[in-house]
Image (cartoon, rainbow, N blue to C red):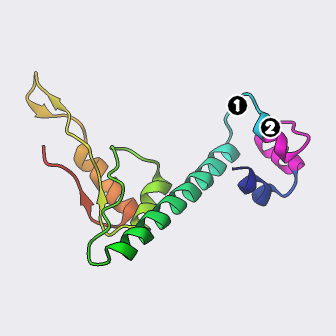
Amino acid sequence: MLQLLKERYGTVQTLNAAWGINLASFEDFLLLGQLPPFSKAMEVDGELFLRQIAERYFSITSSAIRKYDPNHLVLGCRFAGRAQDPVWETAGMYCDVVSVNCYRMVDLDRRVVADGFEDALAEWYSLAEKPLMTPLS
């Protein structure tokens, strides 16, 4: 994260202004006991950092799978339901199929499925732009 902030802001003064903090150096970021009140800049930086993490994870894992098992599909990491949008998008860049381990919620009193699962699948598909695989339940 520190490297991302250095590249993104260039100077600690620019970071201070964007995040509403008062650091003497970028390295002081590592000493923050708690984050300041949430801001749009923090949200954007968090998403960028999350995208970097996802990129690193999926590039390494998919390349290892393709190296040692080139004749099979890369099924991803089997998400346990919801993930942040940058993670779905990055998974779609590296996986042949994006797998989701998500089970339906049922309202037993009304005897109906009550979880919006189809809407979630549609959203995840639009982000990953790859087929989704999930257990039947």
Give the labeled residue for mark 1: 37
Task: State yes or no: discs 2 and 1 in contact (Cβ < 8 Å).
Answer: yes
Give the labeled residue for mark 2: 20
Element type at marker 1? Answer: loop
Vertical placement of residue 106 versus 70, above or below: above
Left or right: 98 in relation to 64: left
Specify whether residue 23 is painted magenta: yes
Left or right: 113 in relation to 120: left
What is the three-letter code of the residue carrying label 1? Pro
Element type at marker 2? Answer: loop
Q: CA distance from mark 2 to mark 1?
A: 8 Å
| Sequence order check, earlier mark of 2 and 1 | 2
At a point 10% along the width and 25% down the height, the residue shown is 110
Left or right: 16 in relation to 70: right
- The outermost residue toward the bottom is 71
In which quarter of the view is residue 33 placed?
top right
- The outermost residue toward the top is 109
Image location (x, y in percent) of residue 102: 26, 43
In which quarter of the view is residue 107 placed?
top left
What is the three-letter code of the residue carrying label 2? Gly
